[in-house]
Image: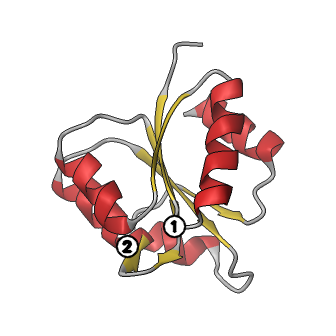
Amino acid sequence: MSMKSILLIDDEVELADLMADELREAGYNCFTSYSVEEGIKRINDNESYHVVITDYKMAFGGAESIINSCKKNSSDSKIIVATGNLDLEEKSVKEVGADYLFVKPVDYDKLLKVLETL
């Protein structure tokens, strides 16, 4: 597997760091941003990521802002939305441009299987 780069955006710092550590242990090059603003800045700075994993709802924005930023920058990054909202449907996040939806706490085995297909 070539080392895919992943941008992980979540304002829950401890969860983001835990997920990033899991992804790095699995062989991914993982970068973290702890706010929508920081994540958008990374995307706007033309940093190229194979996958962007973003929390659905954060202070000052959320997944839609991240997805719009990726689209605006002609990014072909795959987008995975993670949420603690059990009522959120995959269909609704796909309508705004996400590729996958995961409910927190994220099942790492499932996540790694999805990442292998991207």
Give the residue furthest to the top. 1
Q: Residues within 10 Å of mark 1 (few under 14, many from 20)?
A: some
Judging by the rendered image, the residue that carries numbered circle 1 is 11
- Label 1 sits on a secondary structure element that is loop
Q: Residues within 10 Å of mark 2 (few under 14, many from 20)?
A: some
- Ranked by sequence position, the earlier of labels 2 and 1 is 1
Relative to 25, is 35 above or below? below
Indicate left or right for 38 with 115 as reference.
left
Residue type, mark 1 in image: Asp
Indicate left or right for 30 with 74 as reference.
right
Q: Residue 101, located in which quarter of the rendered image? A: bottom right
Q: Which mark is residue 115?
A: none
Query: What is the quadrant of the N terminus in the image?
Result: top right
Q: Which mark is residue 64?
A: 2
Disc count in the image?
A: 2
Give the residue furthest to the bottom. 87
Residue at 63% over, 28% down = 24
Q: Nearer the viewer, residue 53 or 22?
A: 22
